[in-house]
Amino acid sequence: LCSYSCVPARGSEVRLLQFMPEDHVMAEKGKMTVKKWVDSKKINLITKVGMVYKMFVSDFKNYRSVGVDVTELDAFGWWCDLFELYVTNYRSVLVGEERDHLFVFVTKTGKPFSGSYWSDTISSLLLEHTGVSAATNLLRSSFVSAFYDSAVSSDPKMRESVAQVMRHSSKEAQKTYDRRTATQRKRQGLDLIAKMSSTPKLTS
């Protein structure tokens, strides 16, 4: 769930995320950039480049139109610390020496998650920690709805930036993931009108 709080990605983008230490990536990619190497492998990768963790995503819905998406995670220091602790001390215990896959998130037996098992696991965690029974796509929807209900959503540049974080267009974000009611969608406009109508106007 921590991963979704950094980048509200689609379930498959997180489920298919793989990890490689920076020195391994440098040895594997040869003369290619990390981005081009990830593109050639068609994988979703998280690795450290210099001092910054970066997420390279090539296996996602809008890949054909936008190509490999790169997200720097330095804004989430707390998450990077937890991630480093996990891959350094705990992942190898879960996966064991007999498995050679690079997937970050694994089942209790160390295997990569299937799509259905991942969805069931995230839904169970949501129910356990929030009391709400919900599918994984609700995490994206709730983020978008909260964003459009905030004051900063009126800034077109902010809308476009948030849409790029989620790897789609701002139009798609509103159309597909904005779950606000009609009343909630009108709230900012109504508040503005109410403010304007209540402001005394001087007449000559």
Image (cartoon, rainbow, N blue to C red):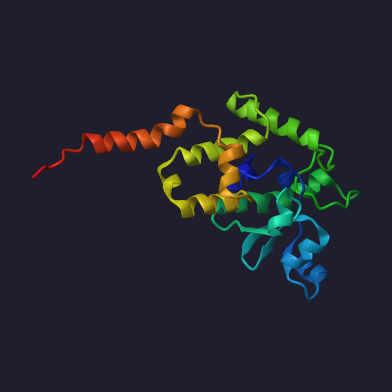
Q: Nearer the viewer, residue 24 or 203?
A: 203
Q: Nearer the viewer, residue 48 or 153?
A: 153
Q: Is residue 57 visible?
A: no
Where is residue 85 drawn, in percent x and y? 67, 51
Q: Please give left or right for residue 170 compared with residue 55 in the image.
A: left
Residue at x 64%, y 30% (from the top left corner)? 126
Where is residue 108 drawn, in percent x and y? 80, 37
In the depicted structure, whether residue 26 falls above or below residue 69 = below
| Picture quadrant of residue 35 | bottom right
Of the 4 image quadrants, the one containing the N terminus is top right
Of the 4 image quadrants, the one containing the C terminus is top left
Number of numbered discs on residues = 0
Most distant residue in the left direction: 204
In the depicted structure, whether residue 85 falls above or below residue 136 = below
Where is residue 42 drawn, in percent x and y? 80, 57
Q: Please give left or right for residue 62 compared with residue 173 in the image.
A: right
Q: Nearer the viewer, residue 114 or 40?
A: 40
